Amino acid sequence: MIVKLAGGVGEHGRNCFFVRGDTVSFLVDCGLAADAAKPYPKLTGEEIEGLSYVFLTHSHRDHTGALPWLESRGFSGIIVGTSETLSQLKEPGRRAISLESFHTPRFWRLCWGRSGHCVGSVWYHFVLEGRSLLFSGDYREDSPVYAVDPIRGIKADLAILDSAYGPELRTGDEMREAFITGIRLYCERQMPLLLPVPKYGRGLELLYLLHRRHLQLPLYGDDHFTEQFRLARQDGQWVTEHFRHELEGVTVRPLNGVPENGVCFLSEPQLDTAASEALAAQFSQAGGVMITGTTDRDTGSWRLCSSGHAAFCRIPVHCTDIDRKQLEGKNCFCRVVPYHTSSWQSAQMVLSI
């Protein structure tokens, strides 16, 4: 059996891992990179045509964005993801099956669990052809919002683990405290603040932190954000009971322009459109913009940060190197490959397992 690191190792984005055994070939994720020169996974036509499955860990573009490209290159297999992940995709693929209804092929064993990253996000543990493979997906154990099934006691020949925050030394609580400190400045000055957030994931964690610290600020959100908040308060599978209870009486008002004060959620993390970038520029003049995740080069978020017109504050939704090593200590992995990070380079991109 071989595992090809087709993207996401030694770089940020286009996360994609190709597994080929004697009886089957499949992918875990098929992401798109922001780099226009090399946006797609490193897969050959023969590898693509021989695929039986693509298993998705969650819906974010750097894990699913290359699916249309894959199908255009001859993929005719089955796309597998949680029902929530598939519903979040604009184009889930011609042959998509929910993970909950997927029938594991004969002589396989497939276990999966919630990964604490967003609604529908999971990790996978495959046992087939005498080999054991663990893929963490984007993983966080201490999310106050998203439920997690901790990876524990697993024996694997190869584990590919989230390490997006690399050498970051701060704990999750310390990163969250830095975010609250930054927010307090706008709260004290009664200024509006814009938070560009992913369509699924981090935004609800920021909302929770604001509420938990009793910051009495008006809250605003675009239509997508307010709908996700509504759904989360009814979700007993992917969202923690604590979150649903704590935010039971919270109101998020519609976002229409720049208010006099308050925190505003916009479901466009990179500010990719002219309209969103223009809105962010208005916020920058009237109050501020805070970016809480990785910015892709030549996007609106990147331009605002580079020019000093937006603040940056990392929120813990991935593992650091320290988190990853702690996870290794709670399991038995023969070989570990950190992914989602440019700080770890591998000279060997095709691994024999």
Image: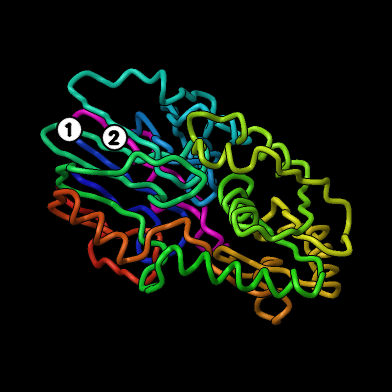
Residue 263 shown left or right of residue 34 in the figure: right
Q: Amino acid at mark 2?
A: Ser
Magenta-tinted stretch: 23-50
Disc sitting over residue 25 in the figure? 2
Q: In which image quadrant can residue 12 be found?
A: bottom left
Q: Nearer the viewer, residue 241 or 26?
A: 241
Quadrant containing the N terminus is top left
* Whether residue 129 is situated above or below residue 173 in the rendered picture: above
At a point 82% along the width and 70% down the height, the residue shown is 190
Give SS at disc 1.
loop
* Whether residue 211 is situated above or below residue 97 in the rendered picture: below
Residue 214 shows in the view: yes
Image location of residue 54, percent across then percent down: 40, 35
Q: Nearer the viewer, residue 241 or 276?
A: 241
Image location of residue 59, percent across then percent down: 52, 41
Residue 46 shows in the view: no
Give the alpha-carbon distance from disc 2 to disc 1, as whole Å. Answer: 8 Å
Examine the structure image and report whether residue 49 is included in the region drawn in magenta: yes
At a point 41% along the width and 27% down the height, the residue shown is 77
Q: Amino acid at mark 1?
A: Asp
- Number of other residues with Cα within 10 Å of mark 2, as a class: few under 14, some 14 to 19, many 20 or more: many
Q: Nearer the viewer, residue 190 or 302?
A: 190
Image location of residue 254, percent across then percent down: 83, 46
Q: In which image quadrant can residue 112 be found?
A: top left
* Whether residue 228 is situated above or below residue 236 in the rendered picture: below
Residue 262 shown left or right of residue 324 in the figure: right
Q: In which image quadrant can residue 79 be found?
A: top left
The residue identified by callout 1 is 22
